[in-house]
Amino acid sequence: MPSKNVAVLLFLGWMFQMNIHSQSLYLSAKGTSEKETQFIDSLYYQRTFKDFASLQDEVDLIKQRLTNFGYIENELLGVKKQNDSSYLASYNLKNRYQTIRIYFDNSINRKILKLVSTDLKENYVEIDIGTLEATLKLLNAEFSNQGDPFSSLQLTNIKIQDNNNLFADLIISESFQKRTIDSIIIKGYEKFPKSFVNRYLKIKP
């Protein structure tokens, strides 16, 4: 009989250990006011995690998403452990900027910029902060389609214009010159007929 009691205790101990290791972690986030907390909740961030590393990644992602929505000065005040499985992340959202004025020069095709704004000025375009990330992705895709997939657009000199607006310069990471194929090297079979490359692939220099 004593041996059975020991077995039961060992089984219960094993179940307890399994429960500890499989226990989920929970995240809640708040701002410095009820209004800020409501906005953070509107992001529909992930709240349940299998480990602390995943939870920390979500804490950082919330901060990045706040930046994308115009709270570029937002601050993570800290992550506080409330109990064995719950954590509270606190943020100070600070000011929200609504638009960004992006200046550009003649190296950037105005026709492409018209894809993201109908109100294109001589040397700048104004974009809603909330659409900035999607706008840059679209512009990068268009530049790539025009012959330079290795170039990328970047915003530099980002500065505050006033309480609602930012401004920045739009640059290309390298000079916008179309790349060309000037040679083809075939590896694996040295006797591969060159005529096939020239005649059937129809790749011109």
Image (cartoon, rainbow, N blue to C red):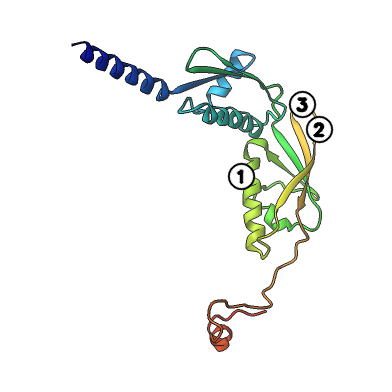
User: What's the residue type where badge 2 is placed?
Assistant: Gln
Q: Are marks 1 and 3 in contact (CB under 8 Å)?
A: no
The answer to whether residue 197 is left or right of residue 154 is left
Front disc: 1 or 3: 1
Q: Tell which tag, 1 or 2, sits nearer the viewer.
A: 1
**Dot 3 alpha-carbon crowd within 10 angstroms: few under 14, some 14 to 19, many 20 or more:** few
In this picture, is 14 found above or below 167?
A: above
The location of residue 124, given as percent across then percent down, is 78, 46
Q: Nearer the viewer, residue 129 or 85?
A: 85
Q: Label 3 sits on what residue type?
A: Asn
Q: Earlier in the sequence, mark 1 or mark 3?
A: 1
Q: Position of residue 32 (x, y in %)?
A: 64, 14
Of the pair 170 and 45, the residue shown nearer to us? 45
The C terminus, quarter of image: bottom right
Q: Residues within 10 Å of mark 2 (few under 14, many from 20)?
A: some
Q: Pointer 2: what residue?
A: 161
**Residue for point 79% across, 50% down:** 104
Quarter of the picture containing the N terminus is top left
Spatial distance from mark 1 to mark 3, Cα to Cα?
23 Å
| Mark 1 surroundings within 10 Å by alpha-carbon count, few (fewer than 14), some (14 through 19), many (20 or more) | few
Q: Is residue 22 visible?
A: yes
The residue that disc 1 covers is 134
Secondary-structure class at tag 1 = helix
Q: Residue at x 51, y 28 (%)?
A: 45
Q: Earlier in the sequence, mark 1 or mark 2?
A: 1
Q: Is residue 115 visible?
A: no
Q: Which residue is mark 3?
A: 163
Residue 95 place in picture, x, y as percent: 71, 23
The type of residue carrying mark 1 is Ala
